[in-house]
Image (spheres, grey):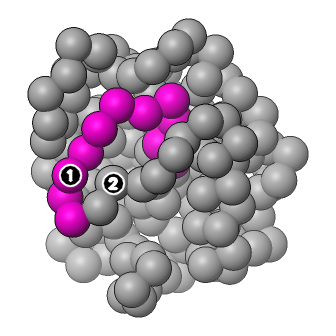
Amino acid sequence: MYFFFSLGTNLGNKEQNLLLAVQKIKERIGKVLSLSSFYATAPWGFTSENTFLNAALCAETAFRPLAILKITQEIEREMGRARKSTNGVYSDRVIDIDLLLCFESDGTPIVLDTPELTLPHPLMQERDFVMKPLMEIAPEVAHIILKKTIHELL
């Protein structure tokens, strides 16, 4: 399986936070196939004095989506993230790892809609801090629901 992730941080040593998250993904999820540049961005959905550093990553793994979600939540907790945003209320964070898109090894896109996880990520196309790094590593990847490539969506 192939997963595309969005990584973000706006507390502490931001570059080190992203690099540590990438290392933990390598160790626990699988081979990192591509990693975007790091993008400095303004907070989205809330007000903060702290700017973000964001990246996109593609990893190959044998794990299924809900297992990946559990692993990424463990990584977030280990790195100091107390809780995920709830009810659309966002806050500063040491690390945020979001699952964006998932594909079977043969390239078949996975669509999932459960209380725990929705794939493709339902807000990804509205967020430049997700789309710009993703565009760097996956411009021709198609969003199965919107029927457009990342390049077309951006």
Quadrant position of residue 42: top left
Q: Residue at x 54, y 41 (%)?
A: 81
- The x, y position of residue 26, in whole percent, is 80, 43
Amino acid marked by disc 2:
Ser
Secondary element at image label 1: loop
Label 2 sits on residue: 85
| Residue 142 appears in view | yes
Location of the C terminus by quadrant is top left
Q: Which of 83 and 20 is in front in this view?
A: 83
Say if 154 sits above or below 43 in the image: below
Residue at 20% x, 52% y: name it.
Answer: 89
Q: In which quarter of the image is residue 90?
A: top left
Q: Which mark is residue 128?
A: none
Q: Which residue is labeled 1 in the image? A: 89
Q: Residue furthest front?
A: 82
| Residues marked 2 and 1 touching at CB (< 8 Å) | yes
Can residue 60 be seen?
A: no
Tell me which secondary structure the magenta stretch mostly adopts. loop
Q: Residue at x 29, y 38 (%)?
A: 91
Q: What x and y, as percent, mark residue 60?
A: 72, 58
Mark pair 2, 1: CA separation = 6 Å
Q: Which residue is drawn at 52% across and 69% down?
A: 102
Q: What element carries label 2?
A: loop
> With respect to residue 78, does 4 lie above or below?
below
Q: Could you tell me the amino acid type at mark 1? A: Val
Q: In which quarter of the image is the N terminus?
A: bottom right
**Dot 2 crowding, Cα within 10 Å, few <14, some 14–19, many 20+:** few
Which segment is the magenta one? 87-97
In-image side of 128 versus 111 (left or right): left
Measured as percent of width and height from the top left, residue 105 is found at 68, 74
Q: Nearer the viewer, residue 72 or 147?
A: 72
Residue at the extreme right: 27
